[in-house]
Amino acid sequence: MAFCLILLFCQAFSRLRSKSPAKSCAASRSYLMTLRILILLHFLMDISRRGLACQVLTLKSSRFQKLNLIGEFMHMHTLNLDFSSTLMSFQEDCFNCMPNLMCLSMCDTRITNLWTTVAALSKLPSLVELRFQYWQYCNDADPETYNISPCGKSDGNADFSLLNSVPFIGESSTDTRELTDPNFSVEDPLRNFYSFDEEVSNHDVQSMVEDSSDDSEVDFTSLNHRYWLSDVFPGWNFQVPLQNELTLQNEEMKESLQGTFTGHIADISMKYMSRHASPICYEKHYREFMIASLPNLKILDNVHIRKIDKERATGIFSQYFEYLPYRWKHKESVVNILQKREIKSGHIKARSSKCRPSYPSGKSQYLYTRSLSAAKMGSSTWPFLHPLSILGCELDKGFRPRQFEYHPSDSSLMVFGTLDGEVVVINHENEHIVSYIPSLGAMNSVLGLCWLKKYPSKLIAGSDNGSLKLYDIRHTPKKITGIYGNSSCVTFDEFDQLTSVHVNSTDELFLASGYSRNVALYDINSGKRLEVFTDMHHGHINVVKFANHSPSIFATSSFDQDVKMWDLRQKPIHPCFTASSSRGNVMVCFSPDDQYILASAVDNEVKQLQAVDGRLHLVFDIASTGSSQNYTRSYYLNGRDYIISGSCDEHVVRVCCAQTGRRLRDISLEGRSLGSSMFVQSLRGDPFRDFNLSVLAAYMRPGSKSEIVKVNLLASGGHAKDDSDDQRLCPSPSMGA
């Protein structure tokens, strides 16, 4: 079919060229653009049906976002995806069709997630050489001296010269012009396959390809700053001169390198730098993670992997990462665990006893649920992401969520407030509206939401203009009619520039904080403001939280870099304790049992404190970005075993163990269209479902809307919605929790 269309277009184009060139110029360009797309389409359809019999495939500068290769590539040993600057992730089985692939290069892509990347690459049993960046040597020394592969010979049967002058692992000679010349521009992806009439300019073709994307606000290729071997091997304490080169300056440093590089290195000036690194290279412990997770790998980023490197990688991985939840070392099927539960096998009990929490309720309540969680997560590296869509709306209404909260006792309910002052209660399981409260001009952006526990139909909402109201959802309409009565609404005294509200454990009192150094205390039963506590911090108080079980204990977090604990019984003039961060604190929350306090400061500074006295219990090892606007929010996942953390300048949610600080998994948020990037505005753990959470995600493009994305780490999948309607918004990130 595609071939017939190509023939028809060729005939039409020939007739068109016989006319006046001036009259047919624009039309001929249009014909050629369409023809090129048809040729590429025919080529890709042919691949999907039959695969390719080639040994080396170069797909440089391709404009795809997620890699999913279909067909059979039984003979392929080398794949080059360099400069595919929109490539962000892989389909789970995308490499199943190439069992003999040995060499893979993905420099200058947007790959970021260590876990999904390793899961995809683990399907390549023959993979021995991998590259996400190019370590370039800038002097005349023999690179073999340093055990840096100049893309040296690893397979005598491989003809790596076919890679069109792109330096690649295994290549005997390379032309590094493409990686080093700042004025070099890569070719259009269509030209990698076919040559066309030069009457259509490269600019036109590039525009044609770029027009397929309606979202291109952030490009991770801006991260291609140079970094040095000392960044890859932290034990090397190199002095980096101003000329951006790495020089061995004394005998002590030369001796320390002899254990890392083979051969004689005396009197040699080393000048190695990273070129065109993908964002994954800047992840903490990236190299150790890849080496420990891909045991067959021999060369990573054209640096040879030695036995000592593997031993070090194993140690680093066990120190900073968890393979499976609750320190499970091996994957196990759910069926096996259920069978052992039926026969009351002690096998799981013995394995999981070290991971049992110090909860007073004992081990039996958690033994098999934890085992099942570990088994499910082991079989679902790609979490299931489902953006909520609100059904049953009579009006063409597009909500702009700004804050949300799960219901504390009804597992199906969630409330969110919008930038337009609306409060919407939804059943997030069937995505139907349960209650809709319009703003009616009384509220601006809703930044504070809190359910009452003893009265599950009631909630308190606060907006940034100071408005504070209590609603009963039993007396509010389910439909968006624009008509709303105030019979079930209680209005409290305003708290100017509000950012946070929270109700105590007995539903008698609630607190409000905002862009001031004060905190207001309200009585829910009488509707009165009881007191305003002034000058509790030196900067504005972004979040205030009551303890989960004590009705008089609360904590405050401020951009003055302090977190403070207070007790209403002692008239909060002096705090119970003060704990400081190196940056402004965005938020604070209590663990479900009130044993710990989780404090999140700007740019991924996350700490866990002892709630009894504020002593530091744990620092989570999350890399900073260097941005003073990277507002970080962290919450406990279901229970107190794990935390989730996300920041407004990043598209990643991190899951960490709350007892050891080890990273369990990263969740990458991907936009629905090519080139789009999502960022974490807020997040909450699902209180009823293990390893389930929701993220308020936003795009940075002006005029777009935010959305709530449900995440299930125990189920496999991707976005469950159609890749259309990509119009989202990133509201102000500094306010609220």
Image (cartoon, rainbow, N blue to C red):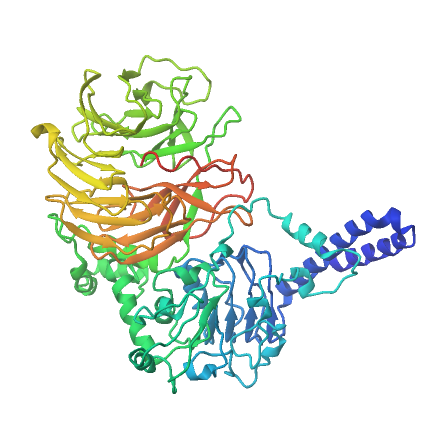
Left/right of residue 539 with respect to residue 34 in the rendered view: left
Instruction: Classify residue 121 as left or right of residue 172.
Output: left
In this view of the protein, which residue sits in the foreground, 306 or 686?
306
Task: Choose between 152 and 695: the one closer to the eye.
Answer: 152
Which quadrant is the C terminus positioned in? top left
Camera sees residue 133? no
Judging depth in this view, the residue of 395 and 528 nearest the camera is 528
Q: Is residue 305 left or right of residue 524?
A: right
Q: Residue at x 42, y 17 (%)?
A: 441
189 w.r.t. 586: above or below: below
Asked if residue 290 is positioned above or below residue 109 in the image, the reply reads: below
Q: What residue is drawn where x is 40% and y is 15%?
A: 484
Determine the image quadrant of residue 558.
top left
User: Which quadrant of the view contains residue 215?
Assistant: top right
What is the x, y in percent for residue 123?
A: 45, 68
**Residue 29 in sight here:** yes
